Image (cartoon, grey):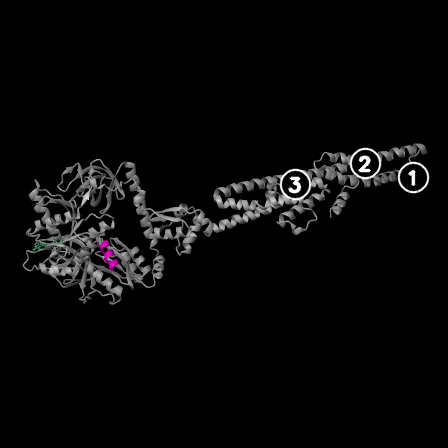
C-alpha cells in the first residue's frame, strides 16, 4: 500500500535530481520522510536523464543535415558536446527547479495542513475546555463524573497507540474508532512519503497526548459529536424533567396567591415554553403573560420537581411585629360585643338603648358620635365595647377578612316571635367563630311575649340556657322600656371575666377596621378597633392595601385623643386611601416599610383578581367538576346590592348541599347584572341570582338570547330555599314572582295631600294598581312596596298598558327621582317545602 503510494509520488516527481533534491529537502521539518523518497526518486531516474540528454545530443551530432555550414567536424563535435552539456545542464536545472518547486509545494501543503490541524486541535481544545468549564459550573458533581468518564478512555488509547504494532489485529484496541482514525491519519501521511519508523513513533507519540486524543483531528470531531449528543440528551432530560436533574436543582419556589406564567418559570429557573407546555399537558391553556392561581402553579412546580413555598402576607411582611407578648405584660381589656339576631327582633333598638342610657347618664354633654362602635361603662365599673353594626353580614365579612374582633355575641330574640331563620344563622356564625353567646330575650314588655318559648326553641339549636342547666346566659330585656338592660350589661361583664381577655398596651398597635369612608372635609377616615398595643398620634401604619401616619384620633364621643388602647374604637385620620371594613391595621417603624407592604398587598390583590378572572375559564371548572364524579354541582352566579349581602349569600349557598349535590358560586359581586355575568353563567349552564339588583338592558337581551335564567330575590331565605330545592332536584324552579311591567319615571310632581307623584311612561307590560312595586335606581332595588295611586289623567285606574303615560305614587315612600324605574310584580302563591 505504501509502496504503490510511493510509486505514485515518484511518478509525479519523475526526473528528480538527488543532490539538489536532497538539499532542498534538508530544510524541511519532516525532512527524513521526504529525503528517503527523494533519494529513491533521484537515484533511479538520473541515469535515464543522462541517457536521454546524451541521446539528444548524439542525435543532433549524428545528423549532418542539421549541421550548420562552414563548420569543421572537430569544431562541430566540440560544439555539439558543449550544446549537449548545456542542454544537460538546462535539463538538470529544469528538473531541479521542478523538484524544488514540487518539494516546496509539498512542504507548503504539509505546513498548511499541519497548521490547519494545529488550529483545529487548538480550537477543539478550546471548545472542549470551554464546554468543560461550563459543564462543571452548571452541573457540579454529576458533570465532573461525566467529564471524567469522557476523558478516561483517551489516555488508554494514547498510551496504546504508539505501542500498537501496525500489524496488530484491528479489533485489538479497546475503542476501535479512534484507532481506525489514527491509522487513517498515518495512511494519509504516507501519501507524502514513507516515514521512518522512529520518526513515525515520535510523531505519533507527540501527537497523541491526552488533549490531542480528546480533541485532535477527526477523532476529536467524533468525540465532540458524542459530547453534543450527551448535551442534547441532557437538555432533553431537563425539558422532560429528567429524574437526575430534578434531584440536583430543586429550588424553593416562592408562590404567592397568584402568579404570572413567565414569573413562575423565572422562579423555577425553567424555560417559559416548558412551563406553558406543562400547563397545556394539565389541560390549561395559558400564555406566558397570563396569571394562574396558586393551586395550579403548585401542581406545575411539583411537576418540575421543585419545592413550593407558599408566601402569605405574614412572610413578606415580617417587619410587622409578631412577637408573642409575655404574660407579665398583659393587662385585662374590655370585651368587644356584637349584637346579632333576626330582622326586626330589636338589634338596633337595643344598641341605641344601651348607648343612650349609658352615655347620656354617664357623659357630660352626652353627644354621641356614630363611628361604628362605642364603649359603655356598667354600673359595676366594667367597660364594654359594642360594635354598632348589627347583623351577621358584617360579622362574617369581617371574619372573612381575617379580623376576628368579636369576643361575645349577644343574640337578640324577640319574645313575641321566637327563633327565626336568621336567629339560627347567627347561632351558627357565633359557633363557627367559637365566640360565646348571651341570649337577650327582647320585647319582654309586649303582652304576647313568651320568653319560655324562646328558651325551648333555642334547645333545638343546641343553645342551652342556664335555666336548663346549660352554660348560656339569658337575660329578659326591653329595648323600648329599658327593662333588664343593666342585667344584660352585667351578664356581658361576667362573661368577659370568664374569658380573661387580655392585651399588652405597651407595644406597637394592631387593630381592625370597623368602618371606613371618604369624608369630604377630613379625607379618608377609618374607625379602628385597637386589638393589641396602643395606637398613638404620629404612628406610621399599614392597613390592608393602604398606609398612613396618624394625624388625629377621635373617639366615640367625638373627642380628640392622643392614644387608644386595647378594645378602644377610634377614628383614624391620615390615611392615603380608604381601607375596607375588616382590614387589619399594623403599626410599623418606617414610612418606607408601610409603603412597601401596602404596595405589595395591592399587587397581591390585583394578582388575585386577575387570577380569579383567569380561573373562571370554564373548561377548568368543568374539568374539576368532572374529576369529582360522585358530586354533581349546581353552579350559580350571584349579584347583590351590597357586599354584605353578597357575602352572606355566598356563605349560605356554600352550606347547601349533601353528598351528591353541591352549590358552587362561580362568581359573586355587587351591582347590576351585566353582560359579563350572563356570559359566565351561559358558559357554565348556571343561573344568575340577583339579590335586590336587576339586569341592565344589554344583559337582559343577552340572557334572552342565550337562554340564561336570571332570578331576582329580595329575601334571603327565598333564595336559599329555591337553590336548595333546585340542588336537591326535588322541586323544579318555582316562580314566586312575576314581573308584569316596567315604567320609567319622567317627572316628579308634588301634590298636596298626596305627596310626591311620579309622572311615568309604562315601557313594558302593564302597570297594575294592586301589584307590588319596586323602585330601581341604576338597576339596584332601593324600595319595595305598594302603590298608593295609579292615575291615568285625572282618574284612578286599575291598569295602565305599555306605551301609555300615567301617574304613580308609592305608599309611605317618596324618594323618587326622574329616570328611576318602577318594576311592577305580582306574587304567586307557592306552597313552601320545608327543607
Ligand atoms: P332590628 O331589625 O333587629 O335592628 O330591629 P329594630 O331595632 O329595628 O326593631 C324592630 C322593631 O321592633 C321596631 O319597630 C322597634 O320599635 C321594635 N322594638 C324593638 N325593641 C322592642 C322592645 O323591646 N319592645 C317593643 N315593644 N318593641 C321593640
**Residue located at (18% from left, 60% from top):** 824
Q: Between marks 3 and 1, how big is the CA–CA gap? A: 60 Å
Residue at mark 3: C-beta within 8 A of ligand 1: no
Which image quarter holds the C terminus? bottom left
Where residue 41 sits in the image (x, y, percent)?
78, 41
Whether residue 651 appears in magenta in the rendering, the answer is yes
- Residue 193, compared with residue 712, is above or below; it is above
Please identify the dominant SS of the magenta region.
Answer: helix
What residue sits right under mark 1 in the picture?
Answer: 62
Visible residue check, residue 102 = no
Instruction: From the top left corner, tell me how far across and down residue 440 is, in percent.
Output: 11, 54
In the picture provided, is 330 more to the left or to the right than 230? left
Asked if marks 3 and 1 touch (Cβ < 8 Å), the reply is no
Residue closer to the observer: 300 or 523: 300
Give whichever of 121, 692 is nearer the camera: 121
From the image, tell me which residue sits under label 3: 205
Q: CA distance from mark 1 to mark 2?
A: 23 Å
Residue interval drawn in magenta = 645-655
Q: Of callouts 3 and 1, which one flags the residue occurring earlier in the amino acid sequence?
A: 1
| Closest to the observer, 477 or 729 | 477
Quarter holding ligand 1: bottom left
Q: Nearer the viewer, mark 1 or mark 2?
A: 2
**Whole-percent x and y of residue 302?**
40, 51
Looking at the rendered structure, the secondary structure element under dot 1 is: helix
Circles 1 and 2: CB atoms closer than 8 Å: no
Q: Is residue 75 visible?
A: yes
Left or right, 294 with respect to 692, comes to right
| Marks 2/3: CA–CA distance | 40 Å
For disc 2, the marked residue is: 92
220 sits to left or right of 261: right
Q: Position of residue 38 (x, y in %)?
A: 76, 39
Amino acid at each position: 500500500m505504501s509502496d504503490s503510494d510511493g510509486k505514485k509520488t515518484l511518478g509525479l516527481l519523475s526526473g528528480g535530481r538527488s543532490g539538489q533534491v536532497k538539499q532542498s529537502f534538508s530544510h524541511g521539518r519532516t525532512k527524513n520522510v521526504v529525503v528517503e523518497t527523494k533519494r529513491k526518486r533521484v537515484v533511479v531516474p538520473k541515469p535515464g536523464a543522462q541517457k536521454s540528454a546524451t541521446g539528444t545530443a548524439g542525435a543532433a551530432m549524428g545528423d549532418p543535415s542539421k549541421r550548420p555550414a562552414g563548420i569543421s567536424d572537430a569544431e562541430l563535435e566540440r560544439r555539439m558536446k558543449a550544446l549537449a552539456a548545456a542542454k544537460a545542464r538546462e535539463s538538470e536545472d529544469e528538473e531541479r527547479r521542478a523538484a524544488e518547486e514540487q518539494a516546496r509545494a509539498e512542504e507548503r501543503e504539509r505546513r498548511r495542513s499541519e497548521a490547519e490541524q494545529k488550529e483545529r486541535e487548538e480550537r477543539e481544545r478550546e471548545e472542549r475546555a470551554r464546554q468543560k468549564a461550563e459543564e462543571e459550573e452548571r452541573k457540579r458533581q454529576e458533570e465532573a463524573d461525566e467529564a471524567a468518564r469522557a476523558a478516561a478512555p483517551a489516555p488508554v488509547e494514547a498510551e496504546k497507540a504508539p505501542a500498537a504494532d501496525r500489524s496488530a489485529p484491528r479489533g485489538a484496541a479497546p475503542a476501535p474508532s479512534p484507532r481506525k482514525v489514527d491509522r487513517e491519519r498515518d495512511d494519509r501521511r504516507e501519501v507524502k512519503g514513507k516515514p521512518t519508523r522512529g520518526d513515525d513513533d515520535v510523531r505519533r507519540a507527540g501527537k497523541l497526548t491526552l488533549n490531542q486524543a480528546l480533541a485532535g483531528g477527526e477523532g476529536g470531531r467524533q468525540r465532540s459529536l458524542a459530547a453534543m449528543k450527551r448535551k442534547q440528551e441532557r437538555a432533553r432530560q431537563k425539558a422532560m424533567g429528567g429524574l437526575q436533574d430534578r434531584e440536583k436543582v430543586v429550588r424553593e419556589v416562592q408562590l404567592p396567591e397568584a402568579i404570572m406564567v413567565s414569573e413562575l418559570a423565572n422562579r423555577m429557573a425553567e424555560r417559559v415554553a416548558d412551563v406553558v407546555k406543562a400547563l397545556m399537558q394539565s389541560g390549561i391553556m395559558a400564555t406566558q403573560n397570563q396569571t394562574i392561581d396558586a393551586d395550579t402553579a403548585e401542581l406545575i412546580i411539583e411537576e418540575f420537581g421543585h419545592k413550593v413555598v407558599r408566601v402569605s402576607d405574614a412572610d413578606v411582611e415580617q417587619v410587622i411585629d409578631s412577637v408573642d407578648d409575655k404574660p407579665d405584660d398583659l393587662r385585662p381589656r374590655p370585651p368587644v360585643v356584637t349584637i346579632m339576631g333576626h330582622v326586626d327582633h330589636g338589634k338596633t333598638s337595643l344598641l341605641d338603648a344601651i348607648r343612650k342610657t349609658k352615655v347620656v347618664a354617664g357623659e357630660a354633654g352626652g353627644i354621641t358620635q356614630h363611628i361604628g362602635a362605642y364603649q359603655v361603662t356598667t354600673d359595676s365599673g366594667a367597660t364594654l365595647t359594642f360594635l354598632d353594626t348589627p347583623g351577621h353580614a358584617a360579622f362574617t365579612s369581617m371574619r372573612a377578612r381575617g379580623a376576628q374582633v368579636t369576643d361575645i355575641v349577644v343574640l337578640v330574640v324577640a319574645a313575641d316571635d321566637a327563633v327565626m331563620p336568621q336567629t339560627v344563622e347567627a347561632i351558627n356564625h357565633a359557633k363557627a367563630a367559637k365566640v360565646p353567646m348571651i341570649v337577650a330575650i327582647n320585647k319582654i314588655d309586649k303582652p304576647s311575649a313568651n320568653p319560655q318559648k324562646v328558651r325551648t326553641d333555642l334547645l333545638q339549636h343546641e343553645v342551652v340556657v342556664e335555666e336548663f342547666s346549660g352554660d348560656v346566659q339569658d337575660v329578659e330585656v326591653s329595648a323600648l322600656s329599658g327593662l333588664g338592660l343593666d342585667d344584660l350589661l352585667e351578664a356581658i361583664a361576667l362573661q368577659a371575666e370568664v374569658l380573661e381577655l387580655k392585651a399588652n398596651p405597651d407595644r406597637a398597635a394592631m387593630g381592625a377596621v370597623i368602618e371606613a369612608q371618604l369624608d369630604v372635609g377630613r379625607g379618608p377616615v377609618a374607625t379602628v378597633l385597637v386589638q393589641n398595643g396602643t395606637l398613638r398620634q404620629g404612628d406610621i401604619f399599614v392597613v390592608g392595601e393602604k398606609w398612613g401616619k396618624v394625624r388625629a384620633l377621635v373617639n366615640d364621643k367625638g373627642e380628640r385623643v392622643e392614644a387608644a388602647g386595647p378594645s378602644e374604637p377610634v377614628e383614624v385620620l391620615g390615611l392615603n386611601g380608604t381601607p375596607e371594613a375588616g382590614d387589619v391595621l399594623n403599626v410599623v417603624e418606617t414610612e418606607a416599610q408601610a409603603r412597601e407592604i401596602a404596595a405589595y398587598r395591592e399587587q397581591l390583590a390585583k394578582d388575585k383578581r386577575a387570577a380569579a378572572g383567569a380561573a373562571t375559564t370554564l373548561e377548568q371548572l368543568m374539568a374539576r367538576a368532572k374529576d369529582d364524579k360522585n358530586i354533581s354541582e349546581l353552579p350559580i352566579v350571584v349579584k347583590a346590592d351590597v357586599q354584605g349581602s353578597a357575602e352572606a349569600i355566598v356563605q349560605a349557598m356554600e352550606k347547601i348541599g349533601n353528598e351528591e349535590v353541591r352549590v358552587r358560586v362561580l362568581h359573586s359581586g355587587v351591582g347590576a347584572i351585566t353582560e359579563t355575568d350572563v356570559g359566565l353563567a351561559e358558559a357554565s349552564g348556571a343561573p344568575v341570582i340577583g339579590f335586590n339588583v336587576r339586569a341592565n338592558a344589554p344583559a337582559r337581551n343577552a340572557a334572552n338570547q342565550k337562554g340564561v335564567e336570571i332570578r331576582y330575590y329580595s329575601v334571603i331565605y327565598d333564595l336559599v330555599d329555591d337553590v336548595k330545592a333546585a340542588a336537591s332536584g326535588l322541586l323544579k324552579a318555582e316562580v314566586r314572582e312575576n314581573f308584569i311591567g316596567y315604567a320609567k319615571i319622567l317627572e316628579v310632581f308634588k301634590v298636596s295631600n298626596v305627596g310626591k307623584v311620579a309622572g311615568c311612561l309604562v315601557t313594558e307590560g302593564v302597570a297594575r294598581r294592586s301589584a307590588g312595586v319596586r323602585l330601581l335606581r341604576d338597576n339596584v332595588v332601593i324600595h319595595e312596596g305598594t302603590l298608593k295611586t295609579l292615575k291615568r289623567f285625572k282618574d284612578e285606574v286599575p291598569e295602565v298598558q305599555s306605551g301609555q303615560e300615567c301617574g304613580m305614587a308609592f305608599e309611605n315612600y317618596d324618594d323618587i327621582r326622574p329616570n328611576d324605574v318602577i318594576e311592577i310584580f305580582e306574587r304567586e302563591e307557592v306552597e313552601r317545602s320545608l327543607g
